[in-house]
Image: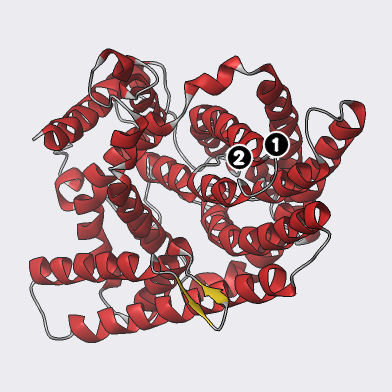
Amino acid sequence: MRILMQLSAAMFGGLLMTRLAKQLKLPAVTAYLVMGVLLGPFCFGSLGIVFRSPEEVEGMDLISQTALGFIAFTIGNEFRLEQLRHMGRQAITVGILQAVCTTIMVDIGLICLHFIVPQVISIPSAVTLGAIAAATAPAATLMVVRQYKANGPLTKLLLLVVAIDDAVGLILFAASFGVATALESGVISLQSVLLEPVLEIVLSLLLGSLAGLLLHFMEKYFHSGSKRLCLSISCVLFTVGVSMLEFRVGGVHIGFSLLLVCMMAGTVFCNICDFSESLMEHIDDWTAPLFVLFFVLSGAELDLHILSNPMVLLIGAVYIVFRSAGKILGAYGSCSLTKCSPEITKYLGITLLPQAGVALGMALTAQQLQDGATVRSVVLFSVLVYELIGPALTKRALLAAGEINVEGRTDARRRNQPVTFFRLGRHESEGKV
């Protein structure tokens, strides 16, 4: 009973907060995150309201994983062959170069901090944080695009780059964490640095491809919209569950990236299914409340106690400054190299700032380092900052690029033509918001 009441309070509170966010011209995702912080165990939760302990929030992890699966599946629908013919080369080049540039920039900043104040951060931790900095959160970006129905070259390239970012981030983190471990132990393992991350990416893409093919095959036997919707949801849920499996084969750790698996499933499905676009409209309707819960729970997870540690704040400030510079300069340079339009070149880097789930997962692994707790605290602090201001910056960048309209009584949600896979659901298109 308590779990149902917590979910109800989280969803209702998030929706109420959007009324205030609308007055402040902030994206709805920011409202959900703020309400999550307020309802979390480090704020009103400490008074016995809603989420009373971190364990209660962690108990809702299945909802967060499910939401991430649907977010990745939705983003995968952007990888249509026609779209890839126009922007595929640019997306791959930009996705790789901006991630590598960000890692290098953060490495430089934190290693310099180590030489200035050696007791604050070690070189292994600095190298690890540099790799974590490459990760970008697809969820917040997706929600901003979805809320304002952003449409245009910048939006399309952004979603492609965000998807590619996950694969690049996995490789960078595996290599950097292997180097960090070697610096501490004096032994480097090619298995953990090279073999396991490559296997994770390849197996994730294969599993996602099989899931997309299976969904297409099964959809042929159902013809009503409601049955196809149920089948699609069950397939994504099954895919999320399988992608969470971990095991060892001959001493080699085998795991999957939930985001990569579900993205690939969405990509394969949208390219072989004739009615994938109409089906995505129905899925968008179904997932709306799930996404509200996801962001409220994400806000509730943020530990406000880290704000009382001056060393974490110092490292976090350096991390945020150099990561932001890396994303913006890396995107600017790679967009110039691939001859993107001036709007994309100028604003893409700003839209890549949000950071959340993937980075937190990497930070959890990094706790194996001697000062791994510091790494996790720094990532938590940066996530707190980026998730609260990142969506607003993404909105402003898309607005400045002319891909969403200025809000008013007939705002962007009514006037813009949506991106192919972000079409309004049938109720919204009739004005029943």
Report if residue 330 is visible in the image.
no
Residue 409 image label? none
Q: Secondary structure at mark 1?
A: helix
Q: Nearer the viewer, residue 245 or 334?
A: 245
Q: Residue at x 71, y 48 (%)?
A: 128
Locate residue 88, reporting x and y percent. Answer: 61, 70
The residue wearing badge 1 is 324
Q: Secondary structure at mark 2?
A: loop
Residue 202 figure quarter: bottom right
Locate residue 409, reporting x and y percent. Answer: 29, 24
Q: Residue at x 24, y 30 (%)?
A: 10
Quick one: quadrant of the C terminus?
top left
Residue positioned most to the front: 185
Identify which amino acid the numbered label 2 is placed on: Leu
Q: Tell whether 112 sits left or right of 152.
A: right
Locate residue 389, reporting x and y percent. Answer: 53, 27
Crowding around mark 2 (Cα neighbors within 10 Å: few <14, some 14 to 19, many 20+) is many
Locate residue 172, reporting x and y percent. Answer: 70, 60
Q: Nearer the viewer, residue 304 or 429?
A: 304
Q: Tell whether 197 sits left or right of 286.
A: right
Residue positioned most to the right: 115
Residue 85 figure quarter: bottom right
Q: CA distance from mark 2 to mark 1?
A: 7 Å
Crowding around mark 1 (Cα neighbors within 10 Å: few <14, some 14 to 19, many 20+) is many
Identify which amino acid the numbered label 1 is placed on: Ser
The residue wearing badge 2 is 353
Q: Residue at x 50, y 29 (%)?
A: 392
Q: Tell whether 91 sits left or right of 257.
A: right
Sequence-first tag of 2 and 1? 1
Q: Residue at x 63, y 50 (%)?
A: 368
Asked if the residue at tag 1 contacts the one at tag 2, i.e. Cβ–Cβ closer than 8 Å, the answer is yes
